[in-house]
Amino acid sequence: MSGVVLAAGVPARLGVLTREVGDAASGARTALGTAGITVYAVLLIAGGNDVIAYGFGVSVNALTVVLRAALIVRPPAVFVLTRWLCLALQDRDRSRPLDGDETGRIDRSPDGGFSGHHRPVPAA
């Protein structure tokens, strides 16, 4: 029953959630979430390292060392990558209303430079 009550509020909040993806604070939240999922995934794999080691024919100790290193290295790397992607999306969304949509047409000037063409963003 509570699932039905919670689902009733989802459409109203969905617009807010999709608008916040480009926010700087939302980028940090997204990056923290992906880092947390990475920690969970590494720990989940580490929980079955004996079966995985047997399946791939490697030493359990070697796989444990690799998973320990992955637990330390992967979450910060995923955090940095996700944060970078969120900031890149934010920059793209910020420049679209100013520059417009790219048309795909590129002209070459007589001095050898290139310039792309943009069309105005249609009014919503």
Image: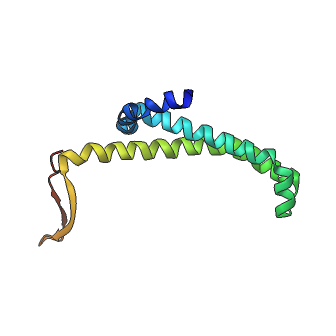
- Left or right: residue 90 versus residue 85 is left
Question: Which residue lies at the image location 39% right of the left edge and 42% below the top edge?
Answer: 87
Q: Is residue 123 left or right of residue 17?
A: left
Q: Position of residue 29 (x, y in %)?
A: 49, 33
Q: Residue at x 16, y 71 (%)?
A: 108
What residue is drawn where x is 15% and y is 57%? 119
**Residue 111 appears in the rendering:** yes
- Specify the quadrant that holds the C terminus: top left
Above or below: residue 59 compared with residue 95: below
Is 10 or 20 nearer to us in this picture? 10
Q: Quadrant of residue 93?
A: top left
> In this orientation, which residue lies closer to the viewer: 53 or 72?
53
- Report if residue 58 is visible in the image: no
Q: Is residue 108 above or below residue 23?
A: below
User: Which quadrant would the N terminus be assigned to in this image?
Assistant: top right
Residue 68 drawn at (x, y percent)? 76, 44
